[in-house]
Image (tube, grey):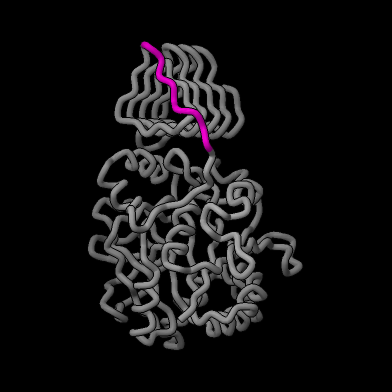
Amino acid sequence: MKAVGLIFSGMYNDGLDNLTRGRTVASVPFGGRYRLIDFILSNMVNSDIMDIGVITKYNYHSLTDHLGNCQDWDLSRKRGGLVIIPPFSTGTSGGYRGKIEELRAALTFLNGKDADYVILADTDTICNIDFKAVIKSHIESGNDMTIVTAKVPEDEKGTSELVFDSVNGRDTDGIYLNYAAKKGQYSSIGMYVISRSLLIELVTSLAAKGFYHLERDLIQQGFNKGTLSIGFFRFDGLVLRNRTIREYHTNNLMLKEEWVRNEIFRPEAPIYTTVRDEVSTYYGEYSSASDCLIADGCRILGRVDNSVLFRNVVIEKNAVVRNSVIMAGCTIREGAVVENAIIDKEVTVTELRSIIGAPQSPTIIQKGETV
């Protein structure tokens, strides 16, 4: 049994607003030192899937810069390894309307493989999942496709791409698109298993007819017509969905909790990322840091509470940062106050400036700005 992975680097990114204006969803920084793609990529590598394609759309320079030669994931190989699949690989100019069109661009990649199965995955969901168990369940079920699902949290506020009335092996009473899920329902976490030959057949047929939406035109339509048998793999571990700015902000701050780290960063299934050696973080004599996740290379002279700081962040004397995500290379000048905010890379917040958002609606400062 052989499987290849196909990762969508960022199709549905409107909810992440300015964080994806100049980068793909896959390359959005997370948790002080990671990018969102690190989690699904590590899940595949830990599941012995060493032949992976990453389908790109646009603004993927930061993604390729982060991945480099992929040696940090042991994917720098003569056979297999990781392949970037750009939009111009099939003569298109760049704009995909949906995932079926993205998969059409990956047909050359798929046709060149001898794998039996394909794992399809988004990058906006963080979890630590064993795909070997998912593939085993798929084979035993005999279904055409297996969808990885998770129970909808009781405090779920937003809509989900795919929602199911109930999940019991291969049974569901209905499949809904862009639906506000209710307690007790299950939703897709953007991961699917399907045979390679069937995927090639379906994508070729649907693309030729002008269909482009994976969830609507392939999954829901196939289910409703009875032409595609669908099974479900219920994942009961922790799932962190990053579909909106609010979710992204909350999930970063949740990563400070020990139980969350224990769920995501398991010793037997580590999360890999590009190694960038930095000096240890410096804490000044009158600095204060409480309940924070702080990467290497920072310089803390002021006060930081309940926040996540990426590499090489400078918090100057008398500056205050609360409930915020501060990305790499930012400087918070003396006397400035940052609260309930997401500060993108290489931003300078000037002296005595206040940036204060609401807990449910964090303020975002775009990459490279001086405010």
Q: Residue at x 53, y 58 (%)?
A: 74
Please say whether residue 274 is visible from this viewpoint: yes
Residue 290 higher or lower than 359, as above or below:
above
Residue 74 higher or lower than 61, as above or below:
below
Residue 118 screen position, x and y as percent:
50, 75
Residue 96 higher or lower than 126, as above or below:
below
Numbered disc total: 0
| Left or right of residue 15: residue 346 | right
| Left or right of residue 182: residue 195 | right
| Left or right of residue 211: residue 149 | left
Instruction: Give the quadrant of residue 140.
Output: bottom left
Residue 322 higher or lower than 275, as above or below:
above
The quadrant of the image that shows the N terminus is: bottom left
Q: Residue at x 72, y 66 (%)?
A: 89
Q: Judge whether residue 278 is colored magenta.
A: yes
Q: Residue at x 44, y 12 (%)?
A: 317
- Decide whether the magenta segment is chiefly helix, strand or loop: loop
Q: Who is closer to the viewer here, 118 or 340?
A: 118
Looking at the rendering, the stretch of residues picked out in magenta corresponds to 277-285
Residue 61 screen position, x and y as percent:
66, 48
Q: Judge whether residue 368 is colored magenta.
A: no
Q: Residue at x 59, y 75 (%)?
A: 211
The quadrant of the image that shows the C terminus is: top right
Residue 147 screen position, x and y as percent:
39, 72
Residue 263 screen position, x and y as percent:
29, 52
Please say whether residue 178 is visible from this viewpoint: no
